[in-house]
Amino acid sequence: MSFDPARFKREERAGYNLIAARYAESAALRTGLNAALIGAADLQPGQAVLDLASGPGVLACEAARQVPGGLVVASDIAEQALAVGRRRAPETNLQFAAADAERLTFADGAFDRVLCGLGLMFFPDVPRALAEMRRVLKPGGRAVFSVWGEEARAPLVSCALQCIRRILPPPKVERLSPFRFGEPALLRRTLEAAGFADVDVHVHVLSCAFDSSQAYWQAFRDLAGGAAAGLSRLPEATLARLGEEVAQELAPCRQGAGYVAQSEVLIASARV
């Protein structure tokens, strides 16, 4: 099975456009994670901030509140997701712009900070995307990322994917793994190889509680991005079965009558 970057981007774009409203509405699940990423960015009033893989701009809205007198640009390849964010955003210092992270349309040195929440692992050409981030950052500027940890330590995503592998036939098209930068040492090496300095990587634990396996399954579908496009093509009966069967993978997360998925997310910051 060969990897087709263009096809992968089309699926990601279609998936995030499809789930944009639900992704924004489920933002409460990621409140702590977004706060940790923004804390690592050390945002200051008056700064210019670029949020990549922004989707409907949940993280960008939080960032805009931290930079009064500044500007935040929410950017993504999913233009309908950006449209959802534009309709929902009350912040006046927040703009939305469709752009591919590997081919940014912004001027050199335009931003003090670049944020990328749960997006780096889905860029087909990571070295090129990182080079673009360095290009648009001012000297001394900082890029901050969050990525899923190793698969065994990220049940919020891994339980659903394991269930999908168990129930459905193998995919016809190769997808990038959401856990491809789950090892801290690899993430650090990748950022340093791109020319970033003062790289710091630490673990944040994202804890999410669900009343049932079906509630977990719906939350996964609201977060799944490109996978959502493929899942949307399945019969409703198959989707319902997945929602029931995922209880098997969720069993280690059982707490009382529900489930608590505690997932490791790596947060990395690096300077130009």
Image (cartoon, grey):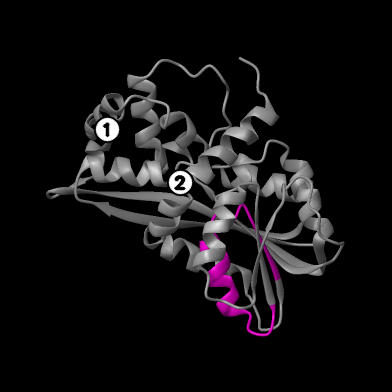
The answer to whether residue 117 shows anywhere in this view is: no
Q: Earlier in the sequence, mark 1 or mark 2?
A: 2
Query: Circle 1 — which element?
Result: loop
Q: Is residue 173 magenta?
A: no
Picture coordinates of residue 252, whole percent (x, y) = 25, 39
Q: Which residue is mark 1?
A: 246
Q: Is residue 60 magenta?
A: yes
Q: Quadrant of the C terminus?
A: bottom right
Compared across the picture, whether 7 is left or right of 193 comes to left
Residue occupying the point 17% across, 48% down: 258
User: Relative to the observer, which residue lies in front, 227 or 39?
Assistant: 227
Range covered by the magenta-colored residues: 49-70
The answer to whether 29 appears left or right of 8 in the picture is left
Closer to viewer: mark 1 or mark 2: 2
Residue identifier under label 2: 19
Is 74 or 125 nearer to us in this picture? Answer: 74
Answer whether labels 1 and 2 touch (C-beta < 8 Å). no
Q: Secondary structure at mark 2?
A: helix
Number of numbered discs overlaid on the protein picture? 2
